[in-house]
Amino acid sequence: MSLERVEVRVPKAAELVAQQIRRQIVHGDLGEGAALPPETTLMAEFSISRPTLREAFRILESEGLITVRRGARGGARVQVPSHEAAARYASLVLQHRGCTIADVVEVRAIVEAPAARWVASRRDRIASADKLGTWLDSYDTVAEPERFGEFNALLVQLTENEALILLTAMLEHITRAVTRAYTRVPHPGDERLARKAERTRRKLVELIRVGAADDAEALWLAHLRAAGNILGETGGTIVDAFS
């Protein structure tokens, strides 16, 4: 019996160094803005050459985990992974793949709607409802409808589910660009739609307050789909929104 030959790729030294530094960043051992040790120190610590270390830096730079400044006062500093960075990168991938606006807004509704259920099911739902209600009372969303996205983000943050927060942040980044493109030109009924959107959010707050999880999710899904359909009807791909 013959065994099939499998090619095993051995990681390069620069990749192994980048892996070690990356682990320190994601584990929180190196915080935002922290300076990495001088090149000579790292070269001695990892027993590598300067070109190998700089290749490791390039890997980490490409991942958005460090910034490198050249010169006498230069050096590498940590950039902690953020939702914003992931959102920007995901947006570029979807733009490259020709993703449509309609696809994005539909997926956003499916992903984001369960947030209403989760918040309404939590033990601290009354405190969450108070926070959402206070937010609504703080802004004239009819005059500034672009702020509705902040309410949506707050609702998701109240789930305290980091995976959901990341996914919705990525989709919201794209939706925000699409909304900006849509609102450049006034449309008949914009004020009416804004008032309806505010009423829906106030109703959602009350459903969360009383723990009506099923009704909260159903209301939020219907609203997100209706709002998304308005944007989706413009047609085209998300590249158009970022042009």
Image: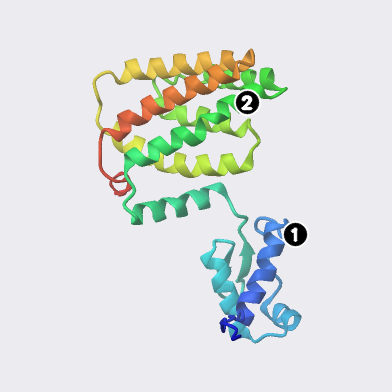
Residue 116 point in image, percent of width and height:
56, 25
The residue under the point 58% across, 68% down is 60
The residue at which mark 1 appears reads as: 29
The foreground one among 177 and 162 is 162
Within 10 Å of disc 2 (Cα), the crowding (few <14, some 14-19, many 20+) is many
Residue 171 point in image, percent of width and height:
45, 42
Could you tell me which secondary element the residue under label 1 belongs to? loop
Image side of residue 145 versus residue 159, left or right: left
Residue type (three-letter) at the residue carrying disc 1: Asp
The residue under the point 35% across, 35% down is 179
Within 10 Å of disc 1 (Cα), the crowding (few <14, some 14-19, many 20+) is few
The foreground one among 48 and 215 is 215
Compared with 138, 53 (above or below) is below
Asked whether residue 69 appears in the rendered view, the answer is no
Compared with 212, 240 (above or below) is below
Q: Quadrant of residue 7?
A: bottom right
Q: Quadrant of the N terminus?
A: bottom right
Could you tell me which secondary element the residue under label 2 belongs to? helix
The residue at which mark 2 appears reads as: 119
The foreground one among 212 and 71 is 212
Q: Quadrant of residue 178?
A: top left
Compared with 215, 31 (above or below) is below
Disc 2 from disc 1: Cα separation: 32 Å
Residue 41 point in image, percent of width and height:
73, 79
Image side of residue 193 versus residue 124, left or right: left
The residue under the point 25% across, 26% down is 186
Mark 2 / mark 1, whichever is N-terminal: 1
Residue 83 point in image, percent of width and height:
55, 47
Residue type (three-letter) at the residue carrying disc 2: Val
The residue under the point 56% across, 82% down is 4
